[in-house]
Amino acid sequence: MAKALQRLFFALWPENPVRDQLIVTVQQLQKHVAARWIDPENFHITLAFLGDVATGRLPDLNQAAEAVSSVCLELSLDRIEHWRKAQVICLTPSANSPVLAQLAADLTNQLRLNGFALETRPFRAHLTLARKATDPRMAFCLEQPIRWTSSAFVLVASSPISQYTILQSWPLREPVRQC
């Protein structure tokens, strides 16, 4: 029997070479910071959080995602930050990516057009590395930025035990090359 509700979100999902770089970064941080570290299999950058969604609404999610058109993107994740209120340690880009910001905005707009209620906070690209972190000194730049290239975005289901499952993927198109 299928679940009536699924906890869902859209995200960028790292390829294995990027995940490997993230693991090395986390291993270095774990030596100095007590926190509940995220399982590397769950690393992602959230584009739009939906919360609990009726499984019957999956076609609406597909329709919204299909309407989004964006080019492949590259991020340079180079800052470790501690967000005190949320008690999380995040990896963020120093420079905003206009392509990523537009992808998140377009996806949010399409989801709203399809009747989904989303949070109103502005999009801020980040990858959560740890939760329940209370060290306020966590803010520095990495010596070697992690370059994350995305050629797709995904719809992910989250289980109560924080296990994530990719349900579907949508490709991002190659940018037009100028001659």
Image: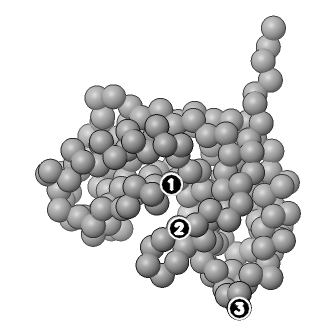
Judged from this view, the residue extending furthest toward the front is 1
Image position, residue 68 (x, y; %) = 80, 51
Dot 1 or dot 3: first in sequence order is 3
Q: Which residue is mark 1?
A: 44
Q: Are marks 1 and 2 in contact (CB under 8 Å)?
A: yes
Q: Which residue is mark 3?
A: 1
Q: Is residue 29 above or below residue 109?
A: above
Most foreground residue, 158 or 88: 158
Query: Circle 2 sits on which residue?
Result: 164
Apparent side of residue 76 relative to residue 172 in the rendered image (left or right): left
The CA distance from mark 3 to mark 2 is: 20 Å
Q: Quadrant of the N terminus?
A: bottom right
Q: Nearer the viewer, mark 3 or mark 2?
A: 3
SS category of the residue bearing label 2: strand
**As drawn, 111 above or below 12:** below
- Would you say 98 lies left or right of 124 here? right
Mark 1 vs mark 2, CA separation in Å:
10 Å
Q: Secondary structure at mark 1?
A: loop
Quarter of the image holding residue 93?
Answer: top left
Q: Position of residue 108 (x, y in %)?
A: 71, 60
> Is residue 98 visible in the rendered structure shown here?
no
**Image point (44%, 45%), residue name:** 19
Residue 23 x, y percent position in the rendering: 34, 46
Give the amino acid at mark 2. Answer: Tyr
Considering the numbered disc 3 on the image, is that residue within a helix, a strand or a loop?
loop
Residue 32 showing in the rendered view: yes
Q: Quadrant of the C terminus?
A: top right
